[in-house]
Image: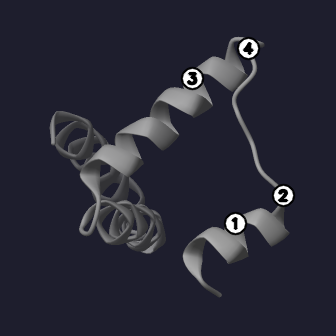
Amino acid sequence: MADFDREYRRTMADAAESLDLSGVVSMLRRWQRVAWSTQDDLDAHRHMLASVVKLGAGGGVVTESWQQTKARLGL
């Protein structure tokens, strides 16, 4: 939650200077997606974040095809 608080304060300060709330709306929409993605399975979300860090550092992560994902999820 510290990341949200820090970004919210910075975004609100920018909005106060510019008198433009579009940045606040964008930030809240992005954080809303984070909230949606974590509400059902926090461990899966943490795994996704760890994978992002690995990929960003040039490492590899285990992947599966879209067909395999659909079959695993029963879609």
Query: How crowded is the residue under tag 2: few (<14 C-alpha within 10 Å), some, or many (20+)?
Result: few
19 to the left or right of 75: left
Task: Give the vertical position of 67 relative to 18 (above or below).
Answer: below
Residue drawn at (78%, 13%) of the image: 58
Query: How crowded is the residue under tag 1: few (<14 C-alpha within 10 Å), some, or many (20+)?
Result: few
Determine which residue is flagged by label 1: 69
Amino acid at pointer 4: Gly
Task: Give the vertical position of 33 relative to 41 (above or below).
Answer: below
Mark nearer the N terminus (2 vs 4): 4
Determine which residue is flagged by label 2: 65
Amino acid at pointer 3: Val
Image quadrant in which you'd find residue 12? bottom left
User: Could you say whether the residue bearing mark 1 is in a helix, strand or loop?
Assistant: helix
Determine which residue is flagged by label 4: 59
Residue drawn at (57%, 75%) of the image: 73
- Viewer-closest of 5 and 23: 5
Amino acid at pointer 1: Thr
Task: Give the vertical position of 72 relative to 8 (above or below).
Answer: below
Image quadrant in which you'd find residue 2? top left
Residue drawn at (77%, 50%) of the image: 64
Q: Position of residue 50 (x, y in %)?
A: 48, 28
Task: Give the vertical position of 20 relative to 56 (above or below).
Answer: below
Amino acid at pointer 2: Ser
- Viewer-closest of 19 and 29: 29
Q: CA distance from mark 3 to mark 2?
A: 21 Å
Pair 3/1: label in front: 1
Pair 3/2: label in front: 2
Query: How crowded is the residue under tag 3: few (<14 C-alpha within 10 Å), some, or many (20+)?
Result: few
Q: Which mark is residue 53?
A: 3
